[in-house]
Amino acid sequence: MLVTGSLAHATSAQLPPLAADAAWGHAAGAVQGVGPGRRAGMPRSTDDVANRPAAHAEDRALMERVAAHDEPAQRELAKRLLPIARKVTRALLRDAVESDDATQLSLIEILRSAKSYRGETAVERWAQRIIVRTTLRHIRDQRRFYKVVDAEAEVGDVRATPVSRRASEELPRPPEAYLAEISEVQREAVLLHHALGYTVPEIAEITGVTQNTAKARLLYGRRALRKLVRRDLNIGKGQDS
Amino acid sequence: MTRQREFDGERWIGIVDAMAVGDPVSSEDTGYVRDHADAEEAKAEQELWDGIASFADASSTSAADDEALIDAVVAGAREREATQGRGRTATVIGIASALAAAAAVVLWVGSTAAPEGDTAEVAQVAPAAPTPVQIETPAVASGTFTAGATTLASAQPVPLGTWLEAGTAEACIDLELATACAAPSSRVQLPSEDDVDLGEGGVTVTVAEGRARPARVKTERGNASSRRGKFEVTVERRTRIVTIVALVGPVTVEDPRAGVRELAEGSSLVLGADVSAANVVPETESAVEIPAPDARAKKPKLSAVDMLHRAQDRMAAKDSKGAIAAYRKLLASYPNSPEAHAALVSTAKLELKVGSHKAALRHFNRYLAKGGANAEEAHLGRIAALEQLGRRDQELKAIGVFLDKYPRNAHAAKLRARAERLRGNAP
């Protein structure tokens, strides 16, 4: 029976620990706690695809062509990675238009970095880290996601936080509204974990901080969100207020 | 038989938080959480995590939009590669000694400061603090810089007085209580630990509170500085026009011609705009010396102005596809240039015409985020894009905003009627 966010995800496509994943470069050890499983469609760490040398050989050949600026190869790679890029950018940016911008930037970065692909893991896995990092950098640069709208009223919609369509009877306001009220680094950690299924060690690697810091950011982010939700529950605030 | 236990909120929180961060939990704790899944607080929180988890759910996109995006990606990658191949400056003063010193550098990670959140709870749950490491400032914070044949990567110290070129992605330098981020392929140097000389390209400086001295960006046409906040300075390569934007907080601008003035938050200033595009010679009273171009540099790629003209030529020739491709190359190659900004509305209108509605909306939005003389046209285009995308609520809101701002526009009556239909009031 699915009971909590954490347990619920655990009973879906739970991935094996990342310890054996050379791309991460560290022995994460067994994931003892229960965290969200990898979202459907996201690359896995040690599944059969990643373990097939033949798959990586094909990927290496493709990436060599991309690195040689072969345009058909570039288009093939961009098309192949487009769904993953959209998922990640959409999870982190929410707005479809903004996520397109970040998708474009991420894919350009991937094409430019093709020569650094070593074939130790599937291309999707290798690329996903670039996509996440590029998107986070884009968010920080643009500060578009959750900033208060400009003084100009007409750009209110441009910067307005899109609301998830998910119906919720228990939550007074949409998740985006709560996320907008916590700090940027906490929001990053929460999104990386709850939307994209990354563990604390992975979050630390992606965001370039220590595992302690990543853990604290996730923890405090969750607590801050919890506090906001409970405040709303206490005062009976509705979604339209 | 399972004994019914009263809901202990604090215990529940401790368990689910431990699960989320990967700490071990006992089977009894797991059972406790399962037994209290129906508690009001648990259900609301579950909705929150489930809602966030759904963020990554796929959204539908059209094949045309996908193709348009892939076109832009391939064109953007090609242009950046061409930029990379231009050749780099040969200045290598001090690099060898600086890199030797880098071998002895220990990093001080800023994250060793108290984590965000309720500090009263730090003692309760914070793990042991990581071993602090010291870093020499200034140092590369992210991305890469090149100085001649040498590449400087993250955490490596930045030598003073040496021209650097940012890599193909943004690259940042840690200063004391400040960060200077250079746009891809920008040329910068640090004459001191407080100053950044900007040769060409763009740099965004974020200054934290508590800095004793202002962080300053110097260009040949003037300087910009701030003690706290965030500002951006760009130097257009061909025209040498300098644009200063005060993003957060005021910025002090030193203009050799007009003296010192303060730029309010949200405003921008252009220096050297009276210089014609053909005049690429720096002024004699330049605030900073620009080194001679690398003699080995290959033939320079098209400037933003040339790219804009090329796109306009294709549009005049009624070659919509060619014009879109040319505009997108401009946007990908010089995203922060005034030419790219001016091209956004033309690009978006063409994209509307060929059915790339999402791309059109993206470009209208980007134009309106900064504003400009074509804002009215951009608003109209945005409304049209939203209509084509079927985003009725957003379209209705956009119409309302437009009519408030431009009540006498020729399309106002038509838009009022459209708004009525969207509200369901029209027959």
Image: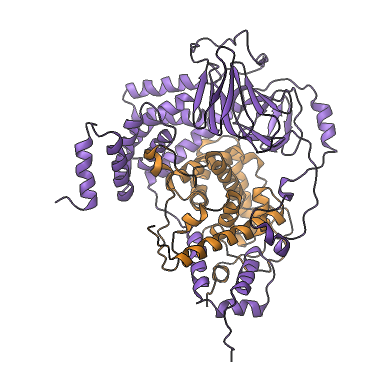
Chain colours: A orange, B purple
**B186 to A197, vertically: above or below:** above
Task: Locate residue B83, reporting x and y percent.
Answer: 58, 26
Q: In which quarter of the image is the N terminus of chain B?
A: bottom right
Q: Nearer the viewer, residue A194 or B288?
A: B288
Q: Can residue B298 be seen in this view?
A: yes
Task: Locate residue B270, reporting x and y percent.
Answer: 51, 20
Residue at the front extreme of this rendering: A235
Residue ID at (60%, 73%): B12
Residue ID at (62%, 72%): B10
**A170 to B311, vertically: above or below:** below
Q: In the image, A145: left or right of B33?
A: left
Task: Locate residue A188, reporting x and y percent.
Answer: 58, 52
Q: Count the marks.
A: 0
Residue ID at (78%, 21%): B93
Q: In the image, B189: left or right of A35?
A: right
Q: Nearer the viewer, residue A71 or B169?
A: B169
Q: Can residue A53 be seen in this view?
A: no
Q: In which quarter of the image is residue B66?
A: top left
Task: Locate residue B409, reporting x and y percent.
Answer: 24, 31
**A116 to B214, vertically: above or below:** below
Q: Which of A187 and B86 is in front in this view?
A: A187
Q: In the image, B146: left or right of B60?
A: right
**B19 to A103, vertically: above or below:** below
Residue ID at (69%, 31%): B145
